[in-house]
Image (cartoon, helix red, strand yellow):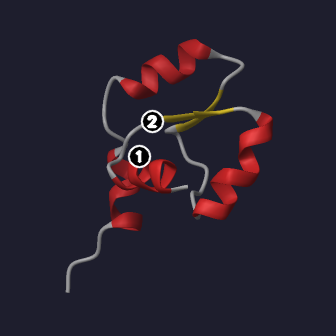
Amino acid sequence: MDFVRDAFGHLKAIAASEGAKALLKAAGVTADGGVTDTADPKVFIKAAKTRQWAREPKVRTLP
């Protein structure tokens, strides 16, 4: 879970199979454009070429 949380928090793409969805849920990872299915590797590769900047407001808050 720590690995998944860290990847999500660092705005990285995550590829997850159907069986891994329980892990994502337990880690508090919400589906977005950077969380892809393993069935289509091209979608993951495209997402992995950059950070998932739209996710940043969900994971970073300024005091």
Mark 1: amino acid: Ala
The furthest residue to the top: 42
**Cβ atoms under marks 2 and 1 closer than 8 Å:** yes
Q: Position of residue 11 (x, y in %)?
A: 35, 47
Figure check: 16 above or below 60: above
Figure check: 59 above or below 7: below
Question: Which quadrant holds the N terminus?
Answer: bottom right
In the image, what residue occupies the spot 41% across and 46% down? 7
Q: Is residue 18 left or right of residue 58?
A: right
Q: Position of residue 56 (x, y in %)?
A: 33, 58
Q: Does dot 1 land on a helix, a strand or a loop? A: helix
**Of marks 2 and 1, the one in the foreground:** 1
In the image, what residue occupies the spot 37% across and 65% down? 59
Q: 41 and 55: which one is in front? A: 41
Question: Which quadrant holds the C terminus?
Answer: bottom left
| Upstream in sequence: badge 2 or badge 1 | 1
Q: Which residue is mark 1?
A: 7
The furthest residue to the right: 19
Q: Is residue 32 left or right of residue 26?
A: left
Q: Residues within 10 Å of mark 2 (few under 14, many from 20)?
A: many
Q: Quadrant of residue 30?
A: bottom right
The tag on residue 49 is none
Q: Residues within 10 Å of mark 1 (few under 14, many from 20)?
A: some
Q: Does dot 2 land on a helix, a strand or a loop? A: loop
Q: Which residue is mark 2?
A: 13
Mark 2: amino acid: Ala
